[in-house]
Structure formats: structure tokens, C-alpha cells
Image: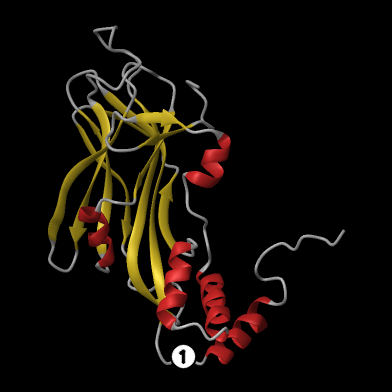
């Protein structure tokens, strides 16, 4: 799979614990469904109209993966020489869940993607093509703008493959690391993503990165459910859920 930009390599548990995903895994298992805030509101309203208690409605939305996604991405091409500490991308934790009827419940996940490689050569050829002895990597930290201070120290996300000049697409998913996910529940905290390289001759070459935050949400109390549904139907029409499957 070397050199295949369509291949995605999943990182779980640490930058050296990497394995390639199949196309099916890329489409389904690795990334949550990308639901619109309006779709989540409508689904929640339908459940409320079924006379389910609100806490049950919210639990169903969470278990079904009806999460709101906020993301930033870049296609900037960067060819950086060591010593390198380049802020390549950042995403700010939102204070608004995309619709007036929604409020934050919890951050359920973060995904970080980067397509990059090192300088394409290195000594100790027995290590080349591995994630050992690598001095070209990506990391992130979290900055609190209100307090003007770092609230999560720099943290290694992914390593480039040692001594390879072909791009590799890494994807890291965090769903259980509450140290970082809890920080994603403070509006206006900023996740900053860096390209790093250390020691003479080392590079970090990148052409894409994406950071996505996923939130489970609740309906706010004291809403006019009927009015919300009418407004959504009026705005999006009969097929606003998506493309309709033609009848046989």
C-alpha cells in the first residue's frame, strides 16, 4: 500500500501502533456518520412526539451515533526542514452546536488526519520503512484563549514512516482519552496541530490535515417541538433528509 494516497492507516493506542484500513472500514468503521444539526434536531423531535422521556431520547441519539461534527482541514503543501515546529492547522471548540435547539452533552470523539512523509532517506537502513528511530512527526496541544495558556502539553499524534518519500495518510481516533476529550467541552479551547522535524537532514512534508470534533447533544428544555418540525420541513422540503431511493 506504499504510495497509495487512497490508503488510510489507522493509529490506535500510540504513534507506532498502525495498521491499514480496508475501503469498507474507511467508509463505515473508522469515521462516525456526519449528521447535520438539523437532522439530529428532527430525529429528536420525532422521538419526543412518541412520548419518550427526554433522557431516553438523548440516550437513543447518543447510542445511534447522532453526533454533531465540527472540523477544520487544510490542503496547504508544506516542505519543512529540521528544526521544524510549524503550526499547520487548528480548530476551536465551538460554543454553539449548530442549531438553536441543541446543547452540548459531551465530546464523544476526536479524529486527526494527516498526509505526510519525511525526507525519503536515512541512515540505519534496517530501520527504514518502519516507525522506529523517526525524527519527523506530528503533534498537537490545546490552548485556552480566555486564560492565554496551554492546558494540554504537546502530545505526539503520528510519526512519518522512516526513510520513505511517498505520502502516507494517517488517521488517529480518540474516543476514550478523557484527558483530551474533556478539554473539548470547554468552548473556545483551541486544538493546535504541528508538523515537527528534528536533527539535520530530517524533513516533514505534508499536503493535507483534518481535525474533527464529535459531540453528543441534548435538546434544550421548553421547546415548541411542533414549531421546530414545521420550520425544518418548510426550510428543507420533503426530501431534506437526503437523496430518496426510487420506488421499484
Q: In this view, does 62 lie to the left or right of 161?
A: right
Pointer 1 local density, CA inside 10 Å: few below 14, some 14–19, many at least 20? few
Residue situated in front as seen by the camera: 179 or 69: 179
Q: Where is residue 113 in the image (x, y as percent from the top left)?
A: 40, 42
Residue extending furthest toward the right? 248
Give the answer, above or below, for where 150 lies relative to 114: below
Which residue is the site of mark 1? Answer: 223
Eyeballing the image, is 142 above or below 186? above
On screen, 122 above or below 97?
above
Its colouring scheme is secondary structure
Specify the quadrant of the image occupied by residue 167: top left
Q: Can residue 239 be seen in this view?
A: yes
Q: Which residue is drawn at 13% across and 63% down?
A: 148
Q: Residue 248: percent from the left, percent from the top?
A: 87, 58
Identify which residue, 121 or 44, lies in the foreground: 44
Q: How many labels does the image show?
A: 1
- Whether residue 85 is situated above or below residue 211 in the rendered picture: above
- For the residue pair 166 and 220, the one nearer the viewer reads as 220
Q: Is residue 174 left or right of residue 59?
A: left
Q: Closer to the camera, 200 or 121? A: 121
Amino acid at each position: 500500500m506504499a504510495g497509495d494516497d487512497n490508503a488510510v492507516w489507522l493509529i490506535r493506542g500510540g504513534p507506532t501502533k498502525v495498521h491499514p484500513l480496508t475501503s469498507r472500514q474507511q467508509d463505515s468503521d473508522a469515521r462516525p456518520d456526519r449528521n447535520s444539526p438539523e437532522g439530529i434536531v428532527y430525529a429528536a423531535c420525532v422521538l419526543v412526539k412518541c412520548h419518550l422521556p427526554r433522557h431516553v431520547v438523548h440516550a437513543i441519539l447518543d447510542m445511534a451515533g447522532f453526533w454533531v461534527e465540527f472540523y477544520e482541514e487544510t490542503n496547504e503543501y508544506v516542505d519543512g526542514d529540521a528544526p521544524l515546529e510549524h503550526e499547520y492547522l487548528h480548530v476551536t471548540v465551538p460554543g454553539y452546536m449548530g442549531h438553536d435547539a441543541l446543547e452540548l452533552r459531551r465530546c464523544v470523539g476526536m479524529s486527526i488526519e494527516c498526509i505526510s512523509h519525511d525526507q525519503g532517506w536515512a541512515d540505519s537502513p534496517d530501520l527504514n520503512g518502519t516507525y522506529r528511530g523517526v525524527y519527523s512527526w506530528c503533534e498537537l496541544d490545546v490552548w485556552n484563549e480566555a486564560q492565554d495558556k496551554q492546558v494540554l502539553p504537546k502530545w505526539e499524534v503520528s510519526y512519518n514512516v522512516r526513510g520513505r518519500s511517498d505520502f502516507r495518510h494517517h488517521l488517529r481516533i480518540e474516543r476514550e482519552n478523557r484527558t483530551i476529550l474533556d478539554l473539548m467541552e470547554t468552548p473556545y479551547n483551541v486544538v493546535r496541530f504541528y508538523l515537527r522535524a528534528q536533527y539535520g537532514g530530517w524533513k516533514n512534508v505534508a499536503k493535507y490535515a483534518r481535525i474533527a470534533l464529535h459531540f453528543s447533544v441534548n435538546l434544550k428544555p421548553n421547546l415548541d417541538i411542533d414549531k421546530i418540525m414545521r420550520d425544518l420541513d418548510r426550510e428543507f422540503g420533503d426530501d431534506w433528509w437526503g437523496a430518496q431511493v426510487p420506488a421499484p
